[in-house]
Amino acid sequence: MKIALVQLDADDNLWRLSAMRNLLQHVEAADLVVFPECMPFDKAIPIAEAEAYLAELTSHNPAHAVIAGGYVLESGMERNAVFLSYRGGILGRYFKRLLWQEPKIANGEEPTLFKWSDKSCIPLICADAADNPSPTGSRMMYEAICLGAGEHVPIVVSSYGAWLNEPYWQVPLQTWARGCGAPLLICGISGHGADFEDGEKPGNYGGGGSGVFWPDERLPWQRHPRCILMIDIKTGLTTSRSIPRNCG
C-alpha cells in the first residue's frame, strides 16, 4: 500500500476545503492520502455537511482514498473526527478518544477499522497515539490488534501536535508500531501556530516530523518541511516532494 501524507504549514493558505481538490492532483499514485488533524474543518460544522463535502471531493478523485476531517457536530455534541472517503462515498468515521485541551469536545469511545477496496488501516487522532505506554494506551493498542493491525494494516494518525521529532512523541509512536507489529504513519503540520503552555514549558503547535515508524529496528523516517511524503509500506520506499504555493 502506498500512502501520501500532506504536510502543510499551520497558517497555510491551502488549509481550506476548496484547495483539497488541487492538492490531490499533486499527489503521485497513492492508495491513501492523509491530511493533518482539523484539515479542512478547523471550525465545527454539522457532520452530514462534512461528509457530503468529502464525498464530493473523492467523486472527482476516484483513484485515492482520503482521510480528512476536523470538528463536527453530531447528535448535539461537538467531536473531533476523521472520515474515510473513497469514490464519492464515506466508508468510515472515527471520533478522537483522548482529548487534549478540548474542553467542549465529546470524546469517542470506539476503535475503528477503515476499509476500502482490498485495503485497510486503523485511524487515530493526535493525542490518541501520545498516551502510550499507559493503561489506556495499552488497551487501545490491544483493540487495534484485535481489529487486524499488522504488517499490511498500518496505523494512521492525523495530528496537529508539537515536538513530533522529539522523544515526547517518538517514544509512544514507536511503542504503537512495535506493540502492534504495524507501520505507524503520522501526518502533522510543518509550521507553527498559536502559542500554548505545557506546564511551565512554552511551545507552539506544529513543528513537523510527519513520517513513518516501523515495527522492526529501522529508525523512523520523518520530514519537517511543507511537502507531500510518500510511503510504500510494502517495500519501505520513502520519498518527499514539495507543494507548489499556488496549487490552491
Image (cartoon, rainbow, N blue to C red):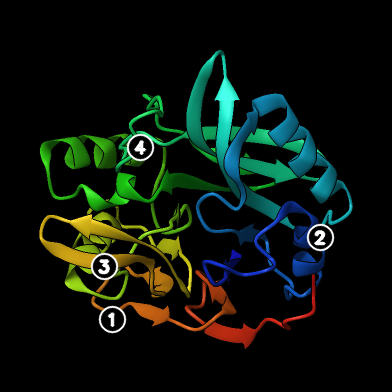
Instruction: Name the residue beneath numbered marker 2.
Output: 21
Q: Is residue 107 above or below residue 160?
A: above
**4 and 1 marks in contact (CB < 8 Å):** no
- For image coordinates 71% across by 34% down, the residue present is 51
How far across and down, in percent of the image, does residue 171 sit? 18, 65
Which is nearer the N-term, disc 3 or disc 1?
A: 3
Gap in Å between the C-alphas at discs 1 and 2? Answer: 33 Å
Between circles 1 and 2, the one closer to the viewer is 2
How far across and down, in percent of the image, does residue 213 sit? 34, 69
Q: Residue 102 got which mark?
A: 4
- For image coordinates 56% across by 80% down, the residue present is 226
Q: Secondary structure at mark 4?
A: loop
Which is nearer the N-term, disc 3 or disc 2?
A: 2
Classify 10 Å Cα crowding around label 3: few (below 14), some (14-19), many (20 and above). some
Residue 240 located left or right of residue 159:
right
- Looking at the picture, tell me which residue is in the foreground, 223 or 99: 99
Instruction: Name the residue beneath numbered marker 3.
Output: 203
**Amino acid marked by disc 3:** Gly
Q: Is residue 241 above or below residue 212?
A: below
Residue 151 located left or right of residue 76:
left
